[in-house]
Image (cartoon, rainbow, N blue to C red):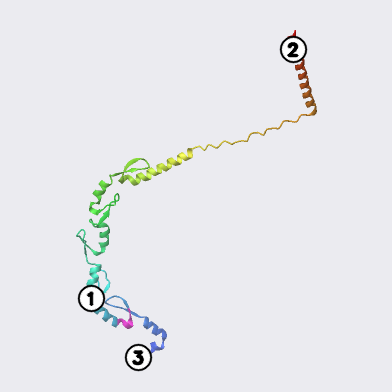
Amino acid sequence: MAAAATAADAGSDPSAALAAAAATSTCAHCQREIPSSNIDLHSAHCARNLQKCEHCGEMVARKLMDEHYNESHAPVNCTLCKEIVTREIWDLHKSEQCPQRIVACEYCEFELPAVELHEHQDVCGNRTEFCQTCKKYVRLREWIGHEIQCHANANANASAQTSSARIIPEREVRPPPPVRPPRPMHGAQHKRLLFTIAVTGIAVMIGSILFQREESF
């Protein structure tokens, strides 16, 4: 009768009903918070069907536990180096640690096992190539640093030559001075010129006559 009375009170009080619906209980098997109204049903289902993984703590269906272990936790046998590697570091082993993983030479891009890379690059890096900028043969292991320095020097020299070169301006072509027209003669000057010409002509005539007379004698 007390339970019936409590239910009746909860039914009559909306706030009490909400509080009862929001109440939760912790499952002893999976440690999850479950609504108190469903805890009994959940506990029975959880204990019968789920199992906690001892490696990661995840709740896994009992029938899938072996599959979960093989996919997530079982050690892996590396087919390249034959080493058994734990699942947690498998990705790191494949990408960086396996001595038989395939890598490429940084000089010729030839692919070979990582364990042979150091010896190969010692030989390959000593090969030379001709630098078109400085006209010298350079080792491949020194190529990157040489290229940066060589191009920097070439650019600096080109800049220095450009800044030191003198720009000779073109000579200014000046037009010739204008020709002044002759000044017109005034009346007095014109008469004086005619008088001079007449006197000169008369003197020449007299001289010629006198010269002819002397020859006749």
> Which quadrant would residue 172 be assigned to in this image?
top right
Q: In this view of the protein, which residue sits in the foreground, 181 or 137? A: 181
Badge 2 marks a residue whose secondary structure is helix
Badge 1 marks a residue whose secondary structure is helix
> Which quadrant would residue 26 be assigned to in this image?
bottom left
Q: Earlier in the sequence, mark 1 or mark 3?
A: 3
For the point 78% across and 26% down, which residue is it? 190
Dot label at residue 174: none
Dot label at residue 212: 2
For the point 41% across and 84% down, which residue is it? 15
Q: Which corner quadrant holds the N terminus?
A: bottom left
Over which residues does the magenta segment extend?
34-39
Tag in front: 1 or 2: 2
Dot label at residue 63: 1
Badge 3 marks a residue whose secondary structure is helix
> Which quadrant would residue 198 be assigned to in this image?
top right
Q: Position of residue 99 (x, y in %)?
A: 23, 55
Cα separation between marks 1 and 3: 42 Å
Magenta residues, dominant SS class: helix
Amino acid found under the numbered disc labelled 2? Gln
Q: Which corner quadrant holds the C terminus?
A: top right
What is the residue that sits farthest to the bottom in this orientation?
A: 1
Residue 89 is at least partly visible in this image: no
